[in-house]
Image: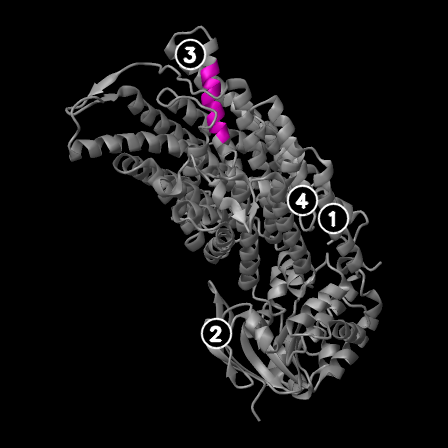
Amino acid sequence: MTDGAKSWALHLGLIVALFAAQFFLPQYHATNLARIMVLAVFAMGYNIAFGYTGLLSLGHALFFAAGMYGMGLPIWQLEWPALPALIMGLVAGGGVAAAVGVLALRTTGVSFMIVTLMFAQAGYLTILYFNTYSGGDEGFVVDRAGRMIGGMDLAADTPRYLAALGLFAVAMLGCLVLVRSPFGRVMVAMRENEERSRMLGYNPFAVKLTALVVSGIYAGAAGAAYGLLFGYVGASFAQIQYSILPLLYVLLGGAGTVIGPFLGAAAMFYLIDIASSYTSAYFFVVGAALVALVVFAPKGMLGTLRDRGLKWLP
Amino acid sequence: MGTPPLSFGPFLFLALLEGTVMAAVLALTAVGLSLVFGVMRVVNVAHGEFFMLGAVLAWFVTYYLPLPPALGWIAALIIAPLLVAGIAALADVLVLKRLKYDPEATIVATIGLLYILQQAALTFYGPDARPVPAPFDLRLQFPWFGYSGYKLFVVVAAAALLGGVWALMTHTKAGLIMRATQVDTEVARAFGINTDRVYTATFALGAALAAVAAVLIVPIQQAHYLMGGDPLLLAFIVVIIGGLGSLRGTVVAALIIGLSDGVISMFFSPTLAKIIATLLVALVLVFRPQGLFGARA
Amino acid sequence: MAALIEASGLTRHFGGVRAVENVDFRLEHGEIHALIGPNGAGKTTFVSLLSGRIPVQSGRILLAGDDITALSAHARVRKGIAYTFQITSIYPRLSVFDNVALAAQSRGAPDLKDQVAAALGRVGLKDHAAQTAGTLSYGHQRLLELAMGLALRPRVLILDEPTQGLAAGEIEGFKSLVASLVPDTTVLLIEHNMDVVMDLATRITVLNFGQVLATGTPEEIRQNSHVQAAYLGGGDAEG
């Protein structure tokens, strides 16, 4: 089998497996898996910016929240139907990423990390500040009636799982197509040797901004879907944890691999789930995982696997 | 305050007093962060947690040692920073050194450290905020309002400590070694300076300064496991605006930020003050990365 | 006939150092033009001004009559200027194929595989296409960088000390490769190896202390007394 065929087989196989899983798993785990799939979309978006293009952002919570509020506010305040609101969330994620990128991409490395972190913090505080319009810290519930797409009630288990799987499948296949495309090669080139890429005729700013906007669209879609499928929009999703979690998922699963973010999201989700049954200080696990990964295994699960032999893994 | 509302002048004066106290503590905290960046080129995102640990450990000391408030507080002032310095030294040796101080990797690692320390505090100290008794109770009476004498003591103490740090850096051999390592690590190593130990010592000193600042402020503001967030953000702002690695810039920026934050918080809302502060950091980094005083980082 | 590159009054200082001072320069179509001079003469800086890596402080650059002075480096690449680095700069973690593919696709390549194969073939690296670039020998890495430059199908190929670190046999191969590039591609090369310069160059410009000392054919330069005094040292060639 050619490398290309192997990739497609693997990724399509995963989608099929996830589709089948809903019939075997108890409902608690199926709902968890739905959550994981949406968070994996978020992580895949982060991976496009970080894993492939080398942009270590600490502000992706802003794009996630932009998507969530971009979907939720029109439904809550303007009584929009669900599908346009979802698309609005996507657009919001990409738009905010573009705005942030235009400024933040004038910096690199550590400065870029801090600038993105600051913009995300400002976004969170702004949601709190305008709490009459945004629901502030408490957030708001998305009305059940507003969570119907084409007759499907997204609050019910099966439609919700299928919607999450649908989004995940589209996102993952889109990511696969992107990284195997010429532009995907350029993103990696920018990460590996920016000066050389510049002298091959590529515009660093344009490439990085495009990667960031695509990343923002993914994050926005994930945020919008999360709010729509689980019925709640809140400021907590704009806090720094939601910038750290996608980084952690990607590091754990393998930066610069397509399936890595999903594996990282699943593993971390359950690690936190288990930890939280023992202590309220479950975020300790996040901290410990970050330190351990960075020191011992910066390539993550699939990255290490790819280095040790599976060269074709995209 | 409970007395009739103050007119503008006295209210501004009160806001400035509060801002000065804040600036003093902020300067001490920020100097710790600045020192670490200047010498090690490392951005320590867990710096706020060292601050928090200083306050939390101060509570443990004053709670468990059967001493009168003044002595208990002094004991805390000695013990807490020493413990925090020890934790920081451990973190440097076990983690940061292994990463060879790579800039992006150390930020990610210090984020992990942030959560480790914060959640450890949650486990052992709990989610509640608890007060620490001030070493003395003195009420200064201004014509318009009464003001805590301890707060003014905090300003004096912070200023004295900053002077001590400055003296350390400019007049002692240890300070000379640190400054040499800051200017050029390679050359310092060639001259026989054990840069590994300098790094560990600097990291510990930076953490200790944050802890001292926290012990100073904790009788005014209660100890809580989440209290590291705001000092971290403000210290960041100060260091970036003042120029990473510049001691003088840090102090001046702390004064400006502390005073403005105090004033804006009292006249408008603390949230708005924070929004302005965060955006300011971002915009300074984008448009004027060298800050006001420092050389290009 | 108009020159391919026409630079006038190029100046670039770094603090107190006058790296390039009021330099006029013409690069004619289809020539191999060598740029020589002692270390620190400003050769790499000058060439960085032409390629856009460093902005000029004053002066003007025309490429086939178009003013490119204000254009960014990547835009100049798209207009046909290619630059190979003095210290080899490739993508060590990517395959040889990917390295060249990035160059080829930058100029639009519907037949990417063929173009990459052609470029690799010209430098003799066809068999190494799947290899990770960082594992190549130093000489091969320099050839890879040359292949990347060729894959850009440039009008002007700027080579910065290309034979540095190459074995004698590799240098011969390099010379015949460069000779085969003209007249379709014009070559500007910085070199310290006088044998290479004298054999390949159609014209030579000598830089010293950021200024042009002399320009002319190899014979003219060899006989120029100023150049001999400043650089050639009457017989002991550098490099």
Q: Is B51 one of the magenta-colored residues?
A: yes
Residue C34's place in the image compared with B170, above or below, is below
Whole-angstrom CA distance, mark 4 to mark 3, is: 52 Å
Residue C237: x %, y % from top left:
71, 75
Q: Which residues are magenta?
A: B49-60
Which label was assigned to residue A16? 1
Q: Residue furthest front?
A: A151
Q: Circle 3 — which element?
A: helix
The residue under label 3 is B72
Q: CA distance from mark 4 to mark 1?
A: 15 Å
| Magenta segment, prevailing SS (helix, strand or loop) | helix
For badge 1, the amino acid type reads Val
* In this view, A53 is above or below C13: above
Separation (CA) of disc 2 from disc 1:
54 Å
Q: Secondary structure at mark 4?
A: helix
Left or right, residue B102 beside residue C183: left
> Which of the chains bears the disc numbered 2?
C
Q: CA distance from mark 2 to mark 3?
A: 68 Å
Residue position marked by numbered label 4 in the rendering: A262
Instruction: Tell me if label 1 and label 3 are in contact, CB under 8 Å.
Output: no
Q: Chain of mark 3?
A: B
In the rendered image, the quadrant that contains the N terminus of chain B is top left
